[in-house]
Amino acid sequence: MKKSQAQSKNSIDDSELPWWVELLFVQIGLPDNWLRTYLKKRKAFRIFFKNNNVLIKYLFIILIGILYIDPIVKESRIFNYCIKGSQNIIKAYTNENTYSEKEYKVLATRYCNGGNIK
């Protein structure tokens, strides 16, 4: 029995380290306490993720939704600023009674989409 215990202990000691541990902590010589801290944080994260799996999935879906909608909202906001500014410019260069408010908006929209003012 003593031989089998000794052999199993030697096989544990002879196991290869992951490549990143070998590179960073053996070859480069980073402090060992960084590795210990990293392994503790990784273990704590895995436990947290295991306990809050459903919540994290819902938050991820909400985050993807926000990231999808955000560019659309920004583009619409910029387009609205363009229309408002174009309306003011068109009103300044024409008589106030020439067009109705809806016609000013149509002209401004056409201008913001790359058309001419008239």
Image: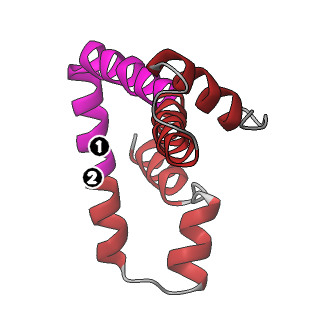
* Contact check, label 2 and label 1, Cβ < 8 Å: yes
> Which secondary structure, mark 2?
helix
Left/right placement of residue 47 relative to residue 19 reads: left
Q: Which residues are magenta?
A: 41-69
Quadrant location of the C terminus?
top right
Is residue 106 on the magenta stretch? Answer: no
In the displayed structure, would residue 34 be above or below residue 62?
below
Neighbour tally class for label 2: few under 14, some 14-19, many 20 plus, Cα within 10 Å? few
Residue displayed at 29% across by 28% down: 49
Residue under numbered circle 1: 43
Whole-percent x, y for residue 76 in the image = 51, 30
> Which quarter shows the N terminus?
top left
57 left or right, relative to 85: left
Residue kind at label 1, given as amino acid type: Lys
Residue under label 2, please give it. Answer: 41
Residue occupying the far bottom of the picture: 29
Outermost residue on the right side: it is 115
Cα–Cα span, label 2 and label 1: 5 Å
Residue drawn where x is 35% and y is 77% of the image: 32
Amino acid at dot 2 = Lys
Tell me the number on the disc at residue 34. none
- In the depicted view, which residue is nearer to us: 10 or 41? 41
Q: Residue at x 54, y 23 (%)?
A: 99
The scheme the figure's colours follow is secondary structure
Element marked by disc 1 = helix
